[in-house]
Image: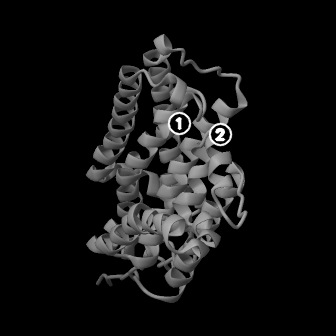
C-alpha cells in the first residue's frame, strides 16, 4: 500500500512594494522634455514666433530703406538694431501662449495629477517645466534674433546701415532681446502655474504687458506725472531696456521727471525679480493645494 506524499505548496515570496522610490531630477527633466514636445501647440507657437519676428523685422527694414530715413533713425543707434525691438514686441504674444499652455494644459486635462503622483515632492515638476521652457525659448529666440539682425543689416546696407559683431552694444542687444523674450515667456509660465487656468492666465499676461503698461506709460507722461515713480519697474517696461540702444536708453531715462534711472541690466533684473516672485507663489500654492 503506497502512501501519497504531498509537498506543501510553495508560495512565492512577496516583496513589499517599493513606496520609497523617487524619480531623480534628471528623470523628471527628461519626462517634462518629452511631454513638452508631444503637445501639438508647441510646434505652431514656436514656428509662429520665428515667422512673426523675422517677418516684422524684414518689413520694418524695407520700410526704413524706402523712406530713406537714415539720418533721423541713426540718432537712435545702428539702423539694423532698431527693427529688432518691433519684432520682439509682437513675438512676445505667441511666446506668452507657449509659456501659459506648457503648464495649464496639464491642469485642463488632469494629467498633472499623474505627474504629481510620480513626483510626490511636486516642486521638481515645476522647476523642470520652467527649465524646459527657458532652454527652448532661449535657443529659438537667439537664433531668430541673429538671423533677423543679419537680414536687417543686408537690407539696410545700401543706406549705410551695418552691424559690427565686435560692438558691445550690438552684442548686448542681440543677446538681450533673446533674454528679454525668454524671461517674459517665463513670466507667462509663472502666472499660468499660479492661476492654473489657460484663459485667465493669458488674459492677465497679455492685458498687463500689452495694455495696462502702455496705458500707464501714457498717463505718466500726460496726466499723472507721479506714475513715473512706478512705470520703470513694470515688467515689460523694465525688461525691454535690455533691447534698447544706448541713445534710446538715455532718452528714456532723461524723460523721467523723478530721475528714476535704470540701466539695461538693472531693468532686466527687475523683470527677473517679477518672475522669481510669481514663481515662488506658484510653488507655494503647488505644495499647499492639490491639483
Q: Is residue 141 left or right of residue 76?
A: left
Residue 198 in percent (x, y) is at 31, 70
Of all residues shown, which one is farthest toward the front? 222
Residue 247 is marked as: 2
Measured along the vertical axis of the image, is residue 3 above or below residue 64? below
Measured along the vertical axis of the image, is residue 123 above or below residue 183? below
Question: Which residue is depicted at the point 51% across and 84% down?
Answer: 285
Question: Which residue is depicted at the point 72% across and 58% down?
Answer: 261
Viewer-proximal residue among 273 and 105: 273
Numbered disc in front, either 2 or 1 = 2
Q: Label 2, label 1: how many angstroms apart (C-alpha)?
A: 23 Å
Crowd rating for badge 2 (residues with CA inside 10 Å; few <14, some 14–19, many 20+): some
Q: Which residue is mark 1?
A: 142
Locate the N terminus and report the quarter of the image it occupies.
bottom left
Question: Which residue is depicted at the point 64% across and 30% down?
Answer: 170
Viewer-proximal residue among 111 and 271: 271
Amino acid at each position: 500500500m503506497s502512501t501519497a506524499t504531498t509537498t506543501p505548496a510553495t508560495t512565492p515570496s512577496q516583496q513589499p512594494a517599493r513606496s520609497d522610490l523617487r524619480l531623480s531630477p534628471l528623470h523628471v527633466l527628461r519626462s517634462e522634455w518629452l511631454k513638452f514636445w508631444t503637445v501639438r501647440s508647441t510646434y505652431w507657437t514656436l514656428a509662429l514666433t520665428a515667422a512673426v519676428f523675422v517677418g516684422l523685422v524684414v518689413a520694418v527694414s524695407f520700410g526704413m530703406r524706402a523712406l530713406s530715413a537714415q539720418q533721423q533713425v541713426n540718432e537712435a543707434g545702428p539702423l539694423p538694431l532698431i527693427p529688432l525691438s518691433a519684432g520682439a514686441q509682437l513675438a512676445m504674444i505667441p511666446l506668452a501662449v507657449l509659456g501659459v499652455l506648457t503648464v495649464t494644459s496639464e491642469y485642463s486635462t488632469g494629467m498633472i495629477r499623474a505627474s504629481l503622483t510620480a513626483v510626490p515632492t511636486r516642486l521638481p515638476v515645476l522647476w523642470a517645466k520652467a527649465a524646459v521652457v527657458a532652454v527652448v525659448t532661449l535657443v529659438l529666440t537667439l537664433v531668430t534674433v541673429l538671423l533677423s539682425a543679419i537680414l536687417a543689416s543686408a537690407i539696410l546696407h545700401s543706406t549705410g546701415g551695418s552691424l559690427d559683431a565686435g560692438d558691445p552694444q550690438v552684442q548686448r542687444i542681440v543677446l538681450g532681446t533673446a533674454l528679454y523674450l525668454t524671461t517674459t515667456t517665463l513670466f507667462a509660465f509663472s502666472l499660468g502655474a499660479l492661476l492654473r487656468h489657460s484663459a485667465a492666465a493669458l488674459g492677465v499676461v497679455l492685458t498687463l504687458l500689452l495694455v495696462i503698461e502702455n496705458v500707464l506709460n501714457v498717463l505718466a507722461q500726460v496726466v499723472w506725472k507721479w506714475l513715473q515713480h512706478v512705470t520703470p519697474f513694470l515688467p515689460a517696461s523694465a525688461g525691454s531696456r535690455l533691447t534698447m540702444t544706448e541713445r534710446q536708453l538715455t532718452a528714456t531715462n532723461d524723460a523721467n521727471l523723478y530721475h528714476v534711472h535704470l540701466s539695461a541690466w538693472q531693468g532686466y533684473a527687475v523683470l527677473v525679480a517679477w518672475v522669481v516672485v510669481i514663481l515662488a507663489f506658484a510653488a507655494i500654492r503647488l505644495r499647499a493645494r492639490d491639483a
